[in-house]
Image: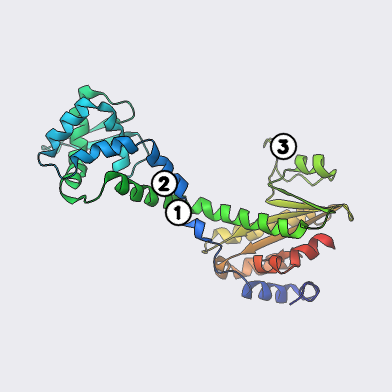
Amino acid sequence: MDFAEYMGMSPVNKFQYFMKTRLTTNRTPSYWVKWENANKHIASYEVSLNTLNYLVGKENIAEEARKLFLEQPNLIKTIPLLIASRDMTLDVLIVDADNEMSHSLIDFLNPDISKIDLYLNFMKDSGLLNFLEKELNESLVDYVLGVQVGLDSNGRKNRSGQQNERILATLLERVVSGDESLHYLLQPTQVQMFNQWGILVPEVTPSKNKGGRRYDGAIYNDLTETVTIIETNFYGSGGSKLKAVAGEFSDLYSVNFKNAKNVNFVWISDGPGWDTAKNPMEEAFAIIPNIINVTMAKNGYLSELVEK
C-alpha cells in the first residue's frame, strides 16, 4: 500500500493496516551478547585467574587456597568474579552450627589478610571451594568468560532500547541521504533544535527539569521550513504500561503539537506487544494522524511525511 492510500484511510483502517504490518522482533544478532563487555571484565583479572588455576582439582583445597592467598593477597579480589557477582563488597548473612545468625560485610576489593578465615569460609559455604576441587574441568579464564556472558544477558533490556535507536538512526539517514534540503538530529532537545534550525518546538517538560525533553529524533526540511518530531518505541511483550504509553503520546500530540506552527509529529511504534493493548492504540489512531511502524517507515512513509 502506498503512502497516499494509507493516509486517505479512516483511523480504524489505518490501525488495522498498522497492526498487520508490524515486526515480530527488533533484535539483531548483536542483541544477545555484547562481547566487549564480557572481555572487558576479564582483561584486568586474567593473570590472577591463571594463577588461581593452581587450585583447580587440588586435594585439601582449603589449605592450598590459604597458602596461595597469604602469598598473593590480591588474588582474593577474584572471588566475586567466580560467583558471578560484580559487587566487590558483599553483605552476607551467616548462620553458625548453633543456628545463631549474624552478618558480615566482606570487602574483596581491599583484601585484609588478617581476615583470611572470613574469605575462606565464604568460599567454602558458597560451594566455591568444592566447585574448584571437584567440578571445574576448564581453565578459570574460560569459566569466567562464560560467567560474564551470562551476566551480560542482564543488559538485554537496555539493548532493546538501543536497538530501536539504531533502527531510527538508519531510517533517518535513509530519509535525508542525497537530499541537501533535509537534516536530522538524534536525541534533540527544544533548545538544540532552535539553535540548529530556528524553529521553536513547544516545550513539554516542566521548566524545573533541566535540559528539557529529549525526543528520539527530528528532521528539518529547508524547503518547507518545518521540523518533524519523531518518537519511537518497540514492545516485544505486552502489559498495562502500553495503555499508558498510548495515552501519553495522544496527549503529547493533542496538547503540544496539533496546533504548533511549522512542527509535525510522527510516532513510529512496533512490536507484538500491541496485541495486548489494541483498544488504547486504536484510540490513539483517532487522535494522532501520523502513526506508522518500522516497515511503513522503511517503505517510504517517513520520507513522505517529512516532505509533505
Going by the image, does 238 lie left or right of 302?
left
- Residue 124's image quarter? top left
- The answer for how far apart the CA atoms under marks 1 and 2 are is 8 Å
Residue position for label 1 = 33
The one of 61 and 247 positioned closer to us in this rendering: 61
Q: Looking at numbered disc 2 in the image, what kind of residue is underneath it?
A: Ala
Counting from the top left corner in percent of width and height, residue 65 is at 17, 34
Instruction: Examine the rendering and report whether any part of residue 83 can be seen.
Output: no
Q: Residue at x 27, y 44 (%)?
A: 140
Q: Locate residue 194: give its quadrant.
A: top right
Tell me which residue sits at (14%, 36%) in the image: 62
Q: Are marks 1 and 3 in contact (CB under 8 Å)?
A: no
Q: Nearer the viewer, residue 119 or 258?
A: 119
Quadrant of the image for the C terminus? Answer: bottom right
Q: CA distance from mark 3 to mark 2?
A: 40 Å
Query: Quadrant location of the N terminus?
Result: bottom right
Residue at 76% in and 57% down: 177
Q: Is residue 272 left or right of residue 299?
A: left
Q: Earlier in the sequence, mark 1 or mark 3?
A: 1
Callout 1–callout 2 Cβ contact below 8 Å: yes
Asked which secondary structure carries label 1, the reply is loop
Which of the numbered marks, if any, corresponds to residue 224? none
State the SS at label 2.
helix
CA distance separating discs 1 and 3: 39 Å
Relative to residue 66, is residue 13 depicted above or below?
below
Looking at this view, name the residue that lies furthest to the top: 114
Query: Which disc, if any, is residue 38?
Result: 2
The residue that label 3 is drawn on is 207
Disc 3 packing (10 Å; few <14; some 14–19; many ≥20): few
Residue 22: horizontal and vertical position, in percent? Answer: 61, 70
Q: Amino acid at mark 1?
A: Val
Residue drawn at point x = 75 percent, y = 67 percent: 301
